[in-house]
Amino acid sequence: MFIRNLALAAGLSFSLLVLTPAISLAETITDCDRLATDRMDRARVTDGASFQSLMSDEAMEACNRDVILHPDVPRLSYQYGRLLLLRKNPKLGLKQVIKAAEKGHLAAQLLLTSGYSSGNYFKGDANQAYYWAEKAAAQGSNYAQASAATWLVEGNGTEKKVEAGLARLRDYSKAGNAYASFSLAVIYRQGNFVKSDVERAILYYNTARKDGLGAAHSALAMMYLGGESVKTDRAKAYKIFREGAEAGHVGVQLLFARNLAEGLVPSKDAKAESLKWMCAAGKRGENLHMELFRSKLVCPAK
């Protein structure tokens, strides 16, 4: 998908660069890319860096240097800004991320959306969260589309327009946006902005499940397990948990394993099944086993 070429740091001469005008800087791989690429960035030019690499002094030095050398490449500004935020330098980090976002870099816009919404890494600001959500939504981000429309319903960071927000969420849901379906499920279940409608909430949870959102499996399973807004149905909760776990959703695997281990969902062999899903969940499963049983998880050889 991306053209991978060596950058100036790899020793290409000026004459060779002049002879290859088809290679743009936006497509070359810099040391900053090699050491600090965000795996979730659609504009990335490498596969992504490990957390160990991200936290290295080498990554910080490389991105600082590359941003100075190439100030007009938003991908590099985003990567440098993200490093600075991870290193707890919000002032300079935010400046770099905003610079990238203003040039249309989607990953930067999404970081600002989530960061301003949650208050993680820098001070929360609902107005800014909504502003950047709309920018990212215009680029087709499912997460941003659902966030912006939900905040429109809530009047969070913008003027409250319940019907307009709901209409957008419904349109996004019909287009396969699982986040929008999940948001509609929560809205109809809670009944804070519309009349409570549990049947419609369940319909939207199931739509979100079908469209691949693990959180929808967990929410619906817990709804039946706890008898929240519905009659308690532990067998149905088990079925929904298992479907989500078998689909590979790690969060569902962990929650399913915990409930199995605690005897809250029916199973012919709860302990064995719990261990199965802890093993499937990898490192996070190992951590859960240690939390519950104070012993190391032993998984069968693959």
Image (cartoon, grey):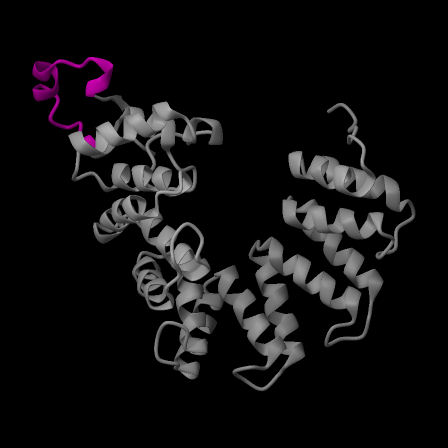
Q: Position of residue 217 (x, y in %)?
A: 66, 58
Task: Specify whether residue 249 is in view.
Answer: no
Q: Position of residue 279 (x, y in %)?
A: 73, 35
Residue lying at 27% horizontally and 26% vertically, measured from the top left: 30
Residue lying at 84% horizontally and 57% vertically, measured from the top left: 264
Q: Position of residue 195 (x, y in %)?
A: 58, 86
- Image vertical order of residue 52 relative to residue 157, above or below: above
User: Is 267 on the left-hand or right-hand side of 42?
Assistant: right
Residue lying at 54% horizontally and 72% vertically, measured from the top left: 184
Magenta-colored span: 8-25
- Image vertical order of residue 39 relative to residue 262, above or below: above
Q: Compare residues 172 and 117 and report the one nearer the observer.
A: 117
| Residue 199 in magenta stretch | no
Q: Quadrant of the N terminus?
A: top left
Residue lying at 87% horizontally and 46% vertically, measured from the top left: 270
Q: Quadrant of the C terminus?
A: top right
The image quarter containing residue 79 is top left
Marker count (numbered): 0
Q: Compare residues 244 and 195 and report the one nearer the observer.
A: 195
